[in-house]
Amino acid sequence: MHSREEKLEAFGRFLDILDELRVKCPWDKKQTNESLRPNTIEETYELCEAIMNHDKHNICKELGDVLLHVLFYAKIGSETGDFDIKDVCDKECDKLIFRHPHVFGEQKANDVAEVLQNWEQLKMKEKDGNKSVLSGVPTALPALIKAYRIQDKARNVGFDWEERSQVWGKVKEEIAEFEQELDHLNEEQATNEFGDVLFSLINAARLYHINPENALERTNQKFIRRFNYLESQTFRQGKNLKELTLAEMDKLWNEAKQSEKTPLA
């Protein structure tokens, strides 16, 4: 791989190009934090998609796009006199050193659980740290990811099941309460109880070291593959999906499932 000097040279080239774009390109000249924000969200999702697809080429490409946005925000900050990329790097370095006393100090951490627990405690001690354990969870996070982060932060201060197997009693309890509300035909309460079901399942995933966001996305992709197979086979027969019976659809669906199990030649 490249030397430290080559990496610094590439980073400097990136900064120089952005400086020139900010002066000479009409689009880049007019960008603000607010106008960049939607594009930043899109670029982040594109990076996440490449990661889920194990697409190394696009991971590299999308990382560059995300880095461009980081540098762009820092460039805008330098123009307003608030901060520049050096401030961004220095603040992050200081935070990393402070939160890793087991690496840069005398504190010991024997496993990942101790590292995470120490991390939350150190965040609480920081001058500009969060006032409460959960206040550090961004309100704009998608609900599934937010639930996972809420539970993880609570765990780091000791609020968790003593044995992870205990979570299944809670899952069953929440499902039963959801079914009861369905029987009562109370949509508002059923919605609340279904939220509890999802929250308990996310909690179970966390306890068994499964990332629920990644797990759900894998299932999304699996469904898309199988549905696309069903659709393509239907078109080959000169039909459309609305003309198939449920039994015919189910047969093609099972074919798609079986094809995924067949090893490649």
Image (cartoon, grey):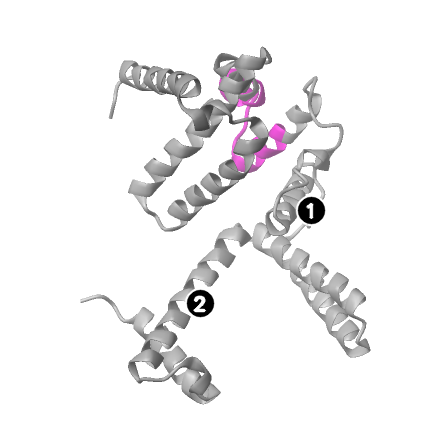
Kind of residue sitting beneath label 2: Phe
Q: Is any part of residue 83 visible from this angle? A: no
Quadrant of image for the N terminus = top left
- Find residue 223 and name its label: 2
What percent of the width, then of the height, locates residue 80? 58, 14
The vertical placement of 24 against 61, above or below, is above
**Quarter location, residue 235:** bottom left
**Quarter location, residue 153:** top right
The vertical placement of 67 against 85, above or below, is below
Query: Which residue is disc 1 drawn over?
Result: 160
What percent of the width, then of the height, locates residue 102? 53, 22
**Quarter location, residue 221:** bottom left
Look at the numbered disc 1 and give the secondary structure of its residue: loop
**In the image, residue 104 lies in the stretch drawn in magenta:** yes
Look at the numbered disc 2 and give the secondary structure of its residue: helix
Q: Is any part of residue 136 visible from this angle? A: yes
Quadrant of image for the C terminus = bottom left
What percent of the width, then of the height, locates residue 204? 61, 56
| Magenta part of the chain | 97-119
Toward the viewer: 57 or 84? 84
Kind of residue sitting beneath label 1: Asp
Could you tell me how far apart the alpha carbons at marks 2 and 1 are, in whole angstroms? Answer: 33 Å
